[in-house]
């Protein structure tokens, strides 16, 4: 067990709330309330196996989309975090490739999108390669540069895409070795309005009230893909808003969690050495974790890779001290 943070808190007038749409693919059945599948070609199939979302197909040309049934607002900050694995081999010719990833599309226009993927492909004079790739596309054609890190060739990755609704810019981050603790590296940034605040820019023609479609996709050619070779897991979406509270309602604190880690919270109202911290229970209340007596809630919660907000509504505590432990 590792001490994550010690928080000394007074009452705050604002609560930083988050709205989650997560899928860990652990029930071996694609949830129709979360995903729809209406665009595909060839023999490719998405299926939940081994508690992950796998893509399998024959050696012909294949692609398939899974669309999130909930869209993301153009007017609100949000982030998406997911794991990928790609152990396919494009080792014979330039026609071979296999990729799995994310597309962000204006809800009413499927001709332009931001594409982020974990792909394998053949490089002339080198052979098979594997990278994290991102770019804008218009009518299936790359716009500007196809961005990739240098010389990492990962088989497993963690990818994070964050949208800033003020600047209208997506930032794409990656970690090519997520099993060794998360360390985000910025891949690039992508502006989607006419101002062009990103390193790369494409005006998607969006205005107030518009939404992004969130699409998981897989695409391959001349590679037969078997179970466990091309997959996504731990898919997390968080929408963030400010929710007004009166000063007397609650205390709250937030921190950046690590995807898949277990966290527990202990509390004290004094730092006198003879008075120990005591275990708090946790109840997931819509978009937040609420602190309750240990007998009334769970002893821990699982990190999402995003910011976690915790609320203590005990009005008797004008000041309190909290410790967050990670397992």
Image: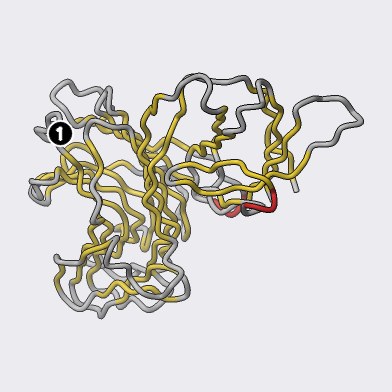
Residue sitting at the far front: 316
- Tell which of 200 and 164 is nearer to you: 164
* 39 versus 83 height, above or below: below
Image quadrant assignment for residue 121: bottom left
* 197 versus 97 height, above or below: above
Residue 135, horizontal then vertical, whole percent: 24, 43
Instruction: Decide if residue 258 is on the left or right side of residue 22.
Output: right
Residue that carries the numbered disc 1 in the rendered image:
209
* Circle 1 SS class: loop
Residue 114, horizontal then vertical, whole percent: 22, 43
Instruction: Decide if residue 16 is on the left or right side of residue 166.
Output: right
Instruction: Decide if residue 130 is on the left or right side of residue 268.
Output: left
* 66 versus 107 height, above or below: below
**Mark 1 neighbour density, 10 Å: few (under 14) some (14–19) many (20 or more):** few
User: Which residue does the image show at 41% across and 38% down from the upper left?
Assistant: 18
User: Which residue does the image show at 56% across and 45% down from the upper left?
Assistant: 258
- Tell which of 90 and 13 is nearer to you: 13
User: Which residue does the image show at 43% across and 43% down from the upper left?
Assistant: 287
- Tell which of 319 and 198 is nearer to you: 319
Image quadrant assignment for residue 144: top left
Q: How many marks?
A: 1
* 102 versus 9 height, above or below: below
User: Which residue does the image show at 25% across and 22% down from the upper left?
Assistant: 197
Residue sitting at the far right: 274
Residue 97, horizontal then vertical, whole percent: 28, 64
């Amino acid at each position: 067990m590792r001490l994550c943070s010690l928080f000394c808190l007074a009452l705050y007038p604002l609560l930083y709330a988050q709205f989650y749409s997560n899928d860990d693919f652990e029930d071996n059945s694609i949830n129709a309330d979360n995903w729809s599948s209406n665009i595909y070609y060839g023999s490719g199939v998405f299926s939940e196996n081994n508690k992950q979302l796998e893509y399998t197909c024959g050696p012909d040309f294949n692609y398939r989309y899974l669309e999130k049934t909930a869209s993301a607002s153009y007017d609100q900050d949000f982030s998406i975090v997911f794991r990928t694995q790609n152990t396919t081999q494009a080792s014979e010719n330039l026609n071979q490739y296999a990729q799995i990833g994310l597309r962000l599309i204006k809800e009413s226009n499927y001709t332009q999108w931001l594409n982020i993927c974990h792909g394998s492909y053949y490089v002339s004079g080198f052979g098979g390669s594997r990278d994290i790739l991102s770019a804008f596309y218009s009518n299936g054609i790359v716009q500007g540069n196809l961005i990739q890190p240098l010389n990492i060739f990962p088989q497993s990755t963690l990818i994070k895409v964050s949208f800033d609704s003020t600047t209208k810019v997506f930032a794409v981050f990656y970690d090519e070795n997520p099993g060794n603790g998360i360390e985000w590296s910025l891949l690039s940034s992508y502006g989607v309005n006419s101002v062009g605040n990103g390193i790369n820019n494409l005006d998607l023609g969006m205005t107030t009230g518009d939404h992004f479609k969130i699409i998981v996709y897989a695409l391959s050619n001349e590679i037969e893909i078997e179970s466990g070779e091309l997959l996504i897991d731990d898919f997390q979406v968080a929408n963030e808003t400010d929710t007004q509270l009166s000063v007397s309602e609650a205390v709250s604190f937030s921190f950046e969690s690590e995807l898949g880690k277990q966290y527990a919270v202990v509390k004290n109202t004094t730092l006198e050495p003879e008075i120990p911290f005591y275990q708090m229970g946790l109840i997931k209340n819509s978009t937040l974790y609420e602190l309750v007596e240990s007998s009334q809630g769970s002893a821990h919660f699982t990190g999402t890779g995003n910011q976690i907000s915790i609320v203590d509504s005990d009005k008797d505590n004008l000041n309190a001290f909290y410790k967050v432990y990670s397992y």
